[in-house]
Amino acid sequence: MKKEKMKKLLILAVAVILVFSLVACGNSGDGDVVTYKAVTEPSFPPFDTTDKDGNIIGFDMDLMNAIAEDQGFKVEYTALGFDALIPALEAGNADIITAGMNAEDPARQAKVDFSTTYYDSALVVVVKADNTTINGFGDLTADMKVASQIATTGADKADALAAEGKIKEAVILDAFTTCILQLRNGDVDAVIIDKPVAESYIKKQPDYVKTVGEPEGAESYGFAVQKGNKELLDKINTGLQNMIDNGTYDELIAKWF
Ligand code: ARG
């Protein structure tokens, strides 16, 4: 009788251990999901911005999160200066750039690898709402100061105009928001910025600034990874195509634009 009881207890104990080890396995499976570090510069709505609590949000994050879910990885976002994004990847401090970054730039392509592009864009001139003299790139003159964000395609354009003597000075600032502030204060005559970002700003605050003239310098945004990180790039490209095919991409466009 006693032996029987011992046997039953033993079987119970083994069963309990088995159940626990199975549960533990399930958990460790979850813990195996890779988390990639993404970096962005969040003064660039609707692509990259922050909410009231300072969380990094935007079209880029929603799209990357959808890709990550589809491909079974996770992403954590950190804010950096736009000029620090590529160096962060090069130094191995980050895995992905999600920053409305023009992928069709040979200098960048030499340093990082870009995904398939996900948004076509171009640069525009932004001036004060009551400005009547500047009606496009062609009206910028040798006495004018023009602001743009550091290390961006807009900054390249402003620098080029200054080098050609077509404007007096390219004022290169940390954030797009600072550029607009300087414009509103009258410190600069114009800002050069990506068209969709200018339009999103003006939609929210229509009274202060406006875009003028025809856009220039067509570009396309891509996500960047470290040079040679084919494994991650393949996941991003596959996930991106899946998001386009299953309608998620269009839903996010409708949500953010
Ligand atoms: N599209 C421009 C570029 O590639 C500007 C991007 C700025 N992005 C940002 N998150 N601030 O240079």
Image (tube, rainbow, N blue to C red):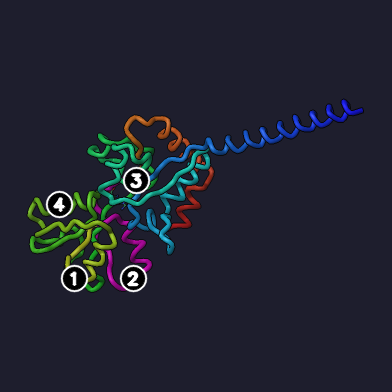
The residue singled out by tag 1 in the image is 186
Q: Distance between the residues labelled 3 and 4?
A: 21 Å
Asked if one can make out residue 212 in the rendered structure from this viewpoint, the answer is no
Mark sitting earlier along the chain (3/4):
4
Proximity of marks 2 and 3: CB atoms separated by less than 8 Å: no
| Labels 2 and 3: the sequence-earlier one | 2
Counting from the top left corner in percent of width and height, residue 122 is at 29, 51
Label 4 neighbour load within 10 Å: few <14, some 14-19, many 20+: many
Give the labeled residue for mark 4: 159
Q: Which residue is drawn at 26% across and 36% down?
A: 111
Q: Name the quadrant of the C terminus.
A: bottom left
Q: Give the range drawn in magenta.
A: 193-220
Reading the image, the residue beneath label 2 is 206
Q: In the image, residue 127 lies at what x, y percent? A: 23, 66
Of labels 4 and 2, earlier in sequence is 4
Indicate whether 199 appears above or below 19.
below
| Circles 1, 3 touching at the beta carbon (< 8 Å) | no
Q: Is mark 4 on a helix, strand or loop?
A: helix
- Side (left or right) of 111 relative to 56: left
The residue shown at (25%, 34%) is: 110
Going from N to C along the chain, the mark reached first, 1 or 2, is 1
Looking at the image, do the residues carrying marks 3 and 4 touch, with CB atoms under 8 Å apart? no
Q: In which quarter of the image is the N terminus?
A: top right
Return the disc, 1 or 3, that comes first in the chain's sequence: 1
What's the residue at 27%, 46% (across, down)? 84
Task: Find the distance from the CA under tag 4 to the CA under tag 1.
Answer: 20 Å
**What residue type is disc 2 on?**
Pro
| In magenta segment, residue 214 | yes
